[in-house]
Amino acid sequence: MQTPDGLSITGELGERYEEVLTPRALDLIVRLHRELGGRRLELLEARRHRMEDLANGGTLDFLPETAHIREDDSWQVAPPAPGLVDRRVEITGPTDKKMTINALNSGAKAWLADHEDANTPQWTSVVGGQLNLLDAINRTIDFTAEGGKTYALKPDEELATIIVRPRGWHLPEKHILVDGEATSGSLVDFALYLATAGLRQIEKGQGPYFYLPKMESHLEARLWNDAFILAQDFLGLPRGTIRATVLIETYPAAFEMEEILYELREHSAGLNAGRWDYMFSVIKSFRTRGKDFLLPDRNSVTMTVPFMRAYTELLVRTCHKRGAHAIGGMAAFIPSRDEAVNEVAFAKVRDDKTREANDGFDGSWVAHPGMVELCKEVFTSVLGDRPNQIENKREDVHVTAAQLLDVAATPGEVTEAGLRNNISVGIQYLKAWLGGLGAVAIFNLMEDAATAEISRSQVWQWLHNDVTLADTGHRVTRELVERIADEEIAKLPGDPADYEEARQTFLEVAVADEYADFLTLPAYQRMS
Ligand SMILES: CC(=O)SCCNC(=O)CCNC(=O)[C@H](O)C(C)(C)COP(=O)(O)OP(=O)(O)OC[C@H]1O[C@@H](n2cnc3c(N)ncnc32)[C@H](O)[C@@H]1OP(=O)(O)O
Ligand SMILES: O=CC(=O)O
Ligand SMILES: [Mg+2]
């Protein structure tokens, strides 16, 4: 394969990889890396400074230097693009062949094709996922399962709109080097899609659409906007062809929602309330600050606790003020073969979607095709014939910084059951991740990179703040965590030795004094 000057590929080249790693896509990666790679590293450094400031007693607040953007009522984001007007139900999931076909056929209005929380960045998934997207758009994708079941796409007009989620700014791509440096996973996923399947999307009357994850500031949104402008100019596309929905899923970003919309305004397709990463970021941001920011057991932190409610209310208010869609988050309950579990799962998802629809969200996410109809029905009961409810301005909402920060008002306890659950889920998830699976069902819940981050961060927070468990009276210590890890592994199917790498990785990110920014960073180092 011919590569542009300065670019080298260290990953193995599989069958048909040249259809994704095209000269145009690789040229775009070189341009993006040389022009924006340095700024990406500076912004990652700025994140570290902000976290240090919080560790030293600082706080988060709306920014005084951007008050003029929040106070200026004259700007709106671009009107919704084709395929993104009605988003009452969106399905998310990884981009392997079967899931691609199932998600597109699911009846959802849109499909978040995930290179992020639900995916692992192993090289075969990075390129293979893009090939599946290309084949899906060209309608050449098919799949036959082991038992002989065959899969094919429904007619185009019945398929979900594709929205691709590239990796977050923190993740490098070690298999594509430019000038000898690892590239950015975000820019690689973006460029490979845009320069191949994304261009076909435009020919088909839609656009290259993206979901942008894990941003921590409006300056990071500006970097994405600059990547869009550079790429559109490079490919001869009109400005505004690309559209992006930003996940508000970090604590700092909740204080910059309006500025993020402003930075991306000609490319914006709204905001999404990424609740799981948000909870992770809340723990991470104030993890050393004692009881005022100490969250109880993961399963007791619901969307109705005060700080979570303040966040979603502000998100709807902000989006609708600027003419943008507000998209709800993921209820982690998935259908089960056990009828009793199933009944609870459907009731919980119905409650969650009903609250979102009544709060003014324009649509929401589901993790499984079995939940599509439920979400559609709930939103349709509020939207009726309207494609969205952007005109519901929610001017009654006035959220303060203190409300966003009111973690202390969260009811619940830290228990040994909660600790055991976090340890077991964390180890099981990491075993799956290291084996190439980014989303799995564990204890009847969908688990992905975001939910696993909560599990390991809670263990870290409880350990480093000398928490005593409410049910057993034991203090959380490194020895206790290690003992529970062994006990929980013994309950799992298979040979305990098969869990050793996952156990070690979990302990590295859950108990080590130095807190890893993301569990996927050390895990990616272990991945070839
Ligand atoms: C915090 C966040 O970022 S949320 C967004 C990121 N997370 C995700 O996207 C998770 C998406 N969900 C999933 O990956 C899956 O639902 C899992 C892994 C949780 C469970 O998957 P499974 O164990 O296969 O579930 P199950 O056996 O019930 O699946 C039944 C069928 O639905 C399909 N299916 C399940 N979830 C999805 C999905 N999200 N997209 C497409 N198809 C799906 C399965 O492929 C299976 O198909 P088949 O009957 O043709 O074989
Ligand atoms: O990406 C979504 C989340 O909840 O995290
Ligand atoms: Mg997330």
Image (spheres, rainbow, N blue to C red):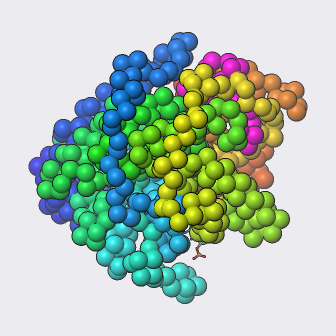
Indicate whether residue 127 is drawn in magenta: no
Query: Looking at the image, is 502 positioned above or below residue 41?
Result: below
Residue at the top extreme?
A: 57
The image quadrant of residue 290 is top right
Query: Is there any visible trace of residue 457 in the rendered image?
Result: no
Q: Nearer the viewer, residue 225 or 191?
A: 225
Q: Residue at 18% x, 38% y: name it.
A: 35
**Residue 245 at x, y percent in the picture:** 41, 49
Residue extending farthest to the left is 5
Percent x, y of residue 485: 72, 41
Does residue 326 sit above or below 484 in this rendering?
Answer: below
Observer able to see residue 112: yes
Tell me the quarter of the picture where residue 462 sits: top right
User: In this figure, what is the number of numbered marks?
Assistant: 0
The location of residue 253, given as percent across then percent down, is 46, 32
Most distant residue in the right direction: 472
Q: Is residue 61 left or right of residue 46?
A: right
On the rendered image, what quadrant is the N terminus found in? bottom left
Q: Residue shown at 39%/78% (left/top)?
A: 156
Q: Can you say whether 404 is above or below 302 in the image?
A: above
Q: Does residue 365 appear to the left or right of 160 in the view shown?
A: right
What span is colored magenta in the figure?
Answer: 281-301
Above or below for 510 versus 102: above
Residue at position x 75%, y 70% in the image:
337
- Measuring 57% from the left and 64% from the top, which residue is drawn there? 384
